[in-house]
Amino acid sequence: MFEHLNLTPNIKEADDFYAELIAAHDGLDRADSNALNARLILILANHIGDRTVLTQALNAATLRQE
Amino acid sequence: MNKIFDIPLYAYQRSPDQDAAMPVQRKVVVIGAGPVGLSAAIDLAQQGVEVVVLDDNNKVSFGSRAVCYAKRPLEILDRLGCGQPMVDKGVEWNVGKVFFDDRQVYDFNLLSEDGHQRPAFINLQQYFFEENLVKRVRELQSQGAPIEIRGCNKVDAIGTHAEYVMLEVDTPEGPYTLKADWLVACDGANSPARRMLGLDFVGKIFEDNFLIADVIMDAKFPSERWFWFDPPFNRGQSALLHKQPDNVWRIDLQLGWEIDKEREKRPENVIPRLKKMLGDDVEFELEWVSIYTFQCRRMEKFRYGRVLFAGDAAHQVSPFGARGANSGLQDTDNLCWKLKLIVDGKAPDSLLDSFNEERVYGAKENILNSTRSTDFITPKSEVSRMFRNAVLDLSEHYEFARPLVNSGRLSVPCTYDDSSLNSADALDAPARTRPGSPCPDAPLGDDFLLTKLGGEFTLLTIDADGPDSFEEGGIKVKRLSLSVRDDNTLELKRRYLGNCESGVYLIRPDQHVAARRPSFDENHFRAALRRATGKE
């Protein structure tokens, strides 16, 4: 199902990244947080670029398929 | 003030057909003297096919309406003998600017590629466009071509028969009956022909209203396309500014769904909106105001026996991308050479099924593109708006987001990839010239490729041998022999050969590629021609 998408641990110092992600939203209201998330998704999607990976990521995020 | 759209250009005149004892049968009758109907008629008449255009009016379109004409339709008009006056009169533009909120986020240059005779786009009022087509009709008439426009001839009933189509036509002097071998309905989005035949027209209505105002002003704005998302002068909505000839500017303001259309159309309500956009110090005069709600829809089929539908009568799109009139001209470009072969008895009626197949495919592509533009311009949900605004915010800072901004994907011709008229690709050359593709232009010294291709079946040989002509089933194919050395810029090579040493192409009369291979092979190209004319 997700043969091109890496769903195994791939981020070094995962706790640091997670803290950074949450901190990026510090002080933002709901709308600004949502906008930040949207921009982040678009930046990451462009970085990945591979259409197959992106489709698999969209499917993986729904949690409906394994 | 007497504008061109106030003057009757094809006033009613009594036709001898109205006094005939028995209904007269014409080869082709076209309903509608708009851009699409007139182009169809010119195309047929140029090829010697008798054609009568019926229009319920006697003037060119009221107001500027369709204003953006793309390269491919201009190339088609060149073949119809009226491309040059359109380009001479039209405003060329290449730069587009995108604004979001109170600032410009980026600009782009459309001017894609060198080595094309025609620009990517011109802006021209529909009434000028139609006036030029009417002039071309008059010119053809003076040369004895079998073409006629009958003004104030309103079709009231259509009867379909196996051998002909019967039309009841109303005129200021009463009704008459006319028969036609073939009927081409180009009578617009509200097509009475479609309604009279009880045919469907399904699709998606967008719940939004747009105010179109054409204003005459001596403004200092450049010849660019400016598009605003959520500007201060039209909060939560979009706006567009575009230049046309004679200091006429097209302004398009999104108004939303819950409005009183009649009220919004009144000058006392339009003018303050425009002042808010243009500033209080800009003087302007209103030429034409309209409010529209658009739809993206198409007929299930464009051919019903001897009745063919083309242009907005067959398919309707949102205006973003200029895919209305532009795709209509590609309909008739596709249709007329096929009709000519059938009228001459050189191809089976079933060739018209390929018109249906290819142009339904084209319409689907146009509807897909214009629906996506509409969804970007007028987001239908909170999350859709959030991503739209995220794209716009990013586009100001990062180049990557700019291709995601969709204020209209401008009309380009489609490639008929799965057409039954194509032969399998047998040349390892660039994909852009694979079978089904519209031929891209290329410079040839002082001339251009598309001019030389003309409007008949052509065997294009590039650094390859081949016969000067050959004939198959009564259809003649003439050779156009070229060498990569004919084009110093090497565009011909880049577009048609790539890394190949030579190439032979069979090109259809509508300048789409039917077949290609590295060298001439008689059996292969005879088969390709039979296939391209519905005989195989």
Image (cartoon, coloured by chain):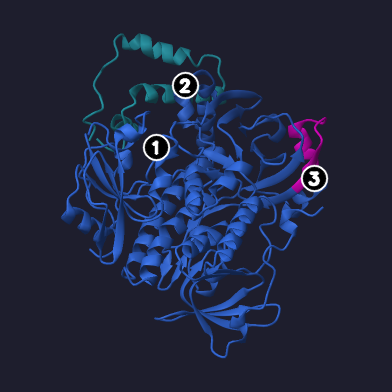
Disc 1 is placed on an element classified as loop
Q: Quarter of the image holding residue B195?
A: bottom right
Q: Which residue is mark 1?
A: B442
- Residue placed at 44% from the left, 15% from the top? A22
Dot 1 falls on which chain? B
> For this view, does B197 lie left or right of residue B465?
right
**In which quadrant of the rendered image does the C terminus of chain B lie?**
bottom left
Q: CA distance from mark 1 to mark 2?
A: 30 Å
Disc 3 crowd, CA 10 A, few/some/many (<14, 14-19, 20+)? few
The residue labelled by disc 3 is B269
Mark 3 vs mark 2: in front = 2
Question: What is the three-letter code of the residue carrying label 2?
Answer: Glu
User: Colour in which chain B is shown?
Assistant: blue
Above or below residue A19? Residue B531 is below
Instruction: Tell me if residue B324 can be seen.
Output: no
Residue B419 falls left or right of residue B331: left
Q: Secondary structure at mark 3?
A: helix
- Reading the image, the residue beneath label 2 is B399
**C-alpha separation, residue under disc 3 versus residue under disc 2:** 39 Å
Between discs 1 and 2, the one toward the N terminus: 2
Residue B326, horizontal then vertical, whole percent: 51, 49
Q: Nearer the viewer, residue B101 or B99?
A: B99
Give the amino acid at mark 3.
Asn
Q: Chain of mark 3?
A: B
Number of labels in the image equals 3
Q: Quick one: label 3 or label 2, which is nearer the N terminus?
A: 3
Region of the chain picked out in magenta, as a range: B269-287
Q: Nearer the viewer, residue A39 or B262?
A: B262
Residue shown at the point (54%, 39%) measured from the top left? B121
Q: Quick one: SS at disc 2?
A: helix
Q: Colour of chain A?
A: cyan
